[in-house]
């Protein structure tokens, strides 16, 4: 059926709920809207699915959620009766319809005689990841669209190891989903099945999570001396971080002043334009409060509390929003410094970052004698390293991070954890306060020690049904272009992650990267800088990453401008 026929099939079906009928009736004369809703199916990728909330095959609604859940149920049933009994842990954030979608997921599983453990209140991504392993379930589902605008929601699937489901298992789930053509015909459970198969997540899971985090503290002496009088501001931005973040800070003895207007659940996220703590504007209410009480640090978490945004007061007394790269190197430096000071740094310690994350991590790890691994974008690849090293004991994981404000210390979770990152950030403030300095001073000391690195992420927005196709076409076009330099920086090698190959520009030598396949082009520059271009896996955006090494900030900013202009010219030549 074409999109018009699908639209008519849905709106005329008696199984469509009243809300759906009314919504589709309101757009029936808007052909462009109808095509967007029914001209494609919401893609279920390696991180699940994400889309705008609304009715249609290309939207997030109760029927697309049930269809995805039925596909997951088929996968679990194929693993045998024991897997069905182990069940699925299910959580959700504060977004519109998150609780409804979570309940629908549990009901579909119940209709298939599969146990589910459903939270009765919002819980963030890291706590869901933890619950999967604590309860020994076979899978997990998190209803969230992370930091996306309020119009979005999503469905993330986790494997039994607590990391996002592997590409191999996801492929099987997707095959089962694609077999379901009747969106409105997914079976519903009986009252008996609901009673038998849908269970509450035991309160003990939360206690176990907090206990695991308290074991990761690094500066008890500094916290004891400074924690109670600390002037630090935290905002959950109406998300699921409020209770866990304030709980863990209280448990370790750190005082944080919470932005009252942003602590309650609000699916409209009415106090911010976008609930993304990467942006200074999102932290603005926290910054105003910090100025009022004399705090020097502000941090905030996104709706599912897997990302942490930080702003610090500079020498001029103004707040600067730090990038994910800057927070990452601060936390990396702090973790390695404290472990080394306490003589607790393992001899086989390893750090993991995505390959688009700042090049400065290499220098910091080298100083401490720590092995640094690079993986593709997506925290599941960091989770895979943790799982591998637990099996072969070749390395001890000490920290992992991504430039998109995602950090993880500890192996309690297998996804980025803004709760533990908030704890570390607050503890780090105590440590530097105890030492008579500030986080901002430490950041500049890092630059003075290792050299200045400017990192920047530019996103180009795409729209329409063909957005993903168009973005991939741009990346594919770059692979056929001969690029020897970006203005003042020469290209030393080019990585094509879609083929797992790296080519030396000077010698022409080709070698394997040793990485999972993903559509991405990465330009290594002669002085250790890099440029990377890839389509986002969760949003219709083409992402361009810049990491520029220079003698100082002024030189780096100048070089950054030249590199951006060169990339823009390159992209223009593809049109």
Image (spheres, rainbow, N blue to C red):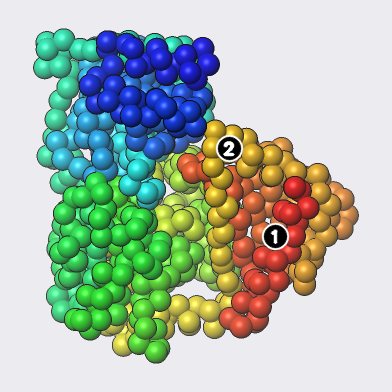
Quadrant of the rendered image containing residue 133: top left
Residue 157 lies left or right of residue 291; in this view the side is right
Label 2 vs label 1: CA separation?
20 Å
Quadrant of the rendered image containing residue 259: bottom left
The answer to whether residue 514 shows anywhere in this view is no
Name the residue tied to disc 2. Answer: 468
The answer to whether residue 464 shows anywhere in this view is yes
Q: Is residue 489 above or below residue 437?
A: above
Residue 153 lies left or right of residue 188; in this view the side is right
Q: Position of residue 151 (x, y in %)?
A: 35, 43
Name the residue tied to disc 1. Answer: 568
Nearer to me, 470 or 91: 470
Q: Is residue 315 above or below residue 393?
A: below
Pointer 2 local density, CA inside 10 Å: few below 14, some 14–19, many at least 20: some
Q: Residue at x 21, y 50 (%)?
A: 266
Q: Position of residue 516 (x, y in %)?
A: 60, 38
Q: Position of residue 527 (x, y in %)?
A: 72, 70
As drawn, the label of residue 128 is none
Q: Is residue 557 above or below residue 317?
A: above
Quadrant of the rendered image containing residue 310: bottom left
Pointer 1 local density, CA inside 10 Å: few below 14, some 14–19, many at least 20: few
Q: Residue at x 39, y 89 (%)?
A: 316
Nearer to me, 340 or 334: 334
Residue 60 lies left or right of residue 391; in this view the side is left
């Amino acid at each position: 059926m074409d999109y018009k026929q699908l639209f008519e099939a849905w709106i005329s079906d008696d199984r469509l709920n009243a809300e759906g009928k009314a919504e589709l009736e309101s757009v029936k004369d808007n052909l462009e809207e109808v095509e967007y809703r029914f001209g494609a199916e919401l893609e279920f990728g390696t991180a699940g699915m994400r889309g705008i909330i609304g009715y249609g095959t290309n939207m997030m609604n109760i029927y697309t959620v049930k269809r995805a859940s039925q596909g997951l149920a088929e996968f679990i049933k194929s693993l045998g009766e024991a897997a069905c009994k182990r069940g699925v842990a299910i959580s959700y954030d504060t977004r519109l319809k998150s609780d409804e979608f979570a309940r629908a997921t549990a009901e579909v599983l119940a209709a298939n005689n599969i146990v589910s453990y459903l939270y009765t209140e919002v819980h963030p991504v890291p706590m869901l990841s933890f619950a999967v392993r604590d309860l020994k379930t076979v899978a997990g589902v998190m209803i969230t669209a992370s930091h996306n605008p309020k119009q979005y929601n999503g469905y993330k699937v986790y494997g039994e190891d607590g990391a996002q489901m592997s590409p191999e298992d996801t492929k099987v789930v997707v095959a089962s989903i694609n077999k379901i053509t009747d969106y409105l015909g997914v079976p519903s459970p009986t009252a008996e099945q609901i009673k038998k198969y849908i269970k509450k997540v035991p309160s003990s899971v939360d206690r176990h999570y907090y206990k695991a985090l308290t074991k990761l503290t690094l500066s008890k002496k500094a916290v004891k001396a400074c924690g109670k009088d600390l002037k630090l501001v935290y905002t959950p931005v109406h998300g699921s971080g409020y209770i866990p973040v304030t709980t863990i800070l209280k448990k370790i003895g750190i005082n944080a002043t919470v932005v009252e207007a942003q602590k309650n659940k609000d699916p409209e996220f009415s106090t911010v334009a976008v609930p993304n703590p990467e942006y200074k504007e999102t932290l603005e209410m926290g910054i105003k409060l910090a100025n009022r009480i004399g705090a020097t640090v502000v941090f905030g978490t996104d709706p599912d509390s897997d990302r942490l945004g930080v702003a610090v007061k500079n020498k001029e007394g103004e707040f600067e929003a730090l990038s994910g790269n800057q927070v990452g190197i601060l936390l990396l430096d702090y973790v390695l410094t404290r472990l080394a000071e306490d003589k607790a740094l393992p001899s086989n310690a390893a750090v993991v970052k995505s390959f688009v994350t700042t090049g400065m991590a290499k220098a910091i790890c080298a100083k401490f004698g720590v092995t640094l691994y690079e993986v593709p974008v997506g925290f599941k690849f960091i989770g895979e390293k943790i799982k591998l090293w637990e099996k072969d004991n070749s390395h001890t994981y000490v920290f992992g991070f991504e430039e998109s404000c995602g950090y993880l210390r500890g192996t309690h979770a297998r996804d980025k954890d803004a709760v533990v990152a908030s704890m570390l950030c607050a503890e780090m403030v105590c440590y530097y306060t105890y030492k008579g300095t500030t986080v901002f001073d430490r950041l500049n000391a890092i630059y003075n020690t290792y050299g200045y690195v400017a990192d920047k992420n530019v996103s180009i927005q795409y729209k329409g049904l063909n957005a993903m196709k168009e973005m991939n076409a741009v990346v594919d076009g770059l692979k056929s272009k001969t690029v020897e330099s970006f203005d003042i920086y020469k290209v030393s090698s080019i990585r094509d992650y879609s083929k797992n190959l790296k080519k030396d520009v000077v010698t022409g030598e080709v070698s394997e990267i040793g990485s999972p396949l993903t559509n991405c082009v990465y330009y290594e520059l002669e002085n250790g800088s890099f440029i990377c271009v890839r389509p986002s896996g969760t949003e219709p955006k083409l992402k361009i990453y810049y990491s520029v090494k220079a003698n100082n900030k002024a030189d780096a900013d100048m070089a950054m401008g030249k590199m951006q202009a060169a990339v823009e010219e390159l992209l223009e030549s593809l049109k």
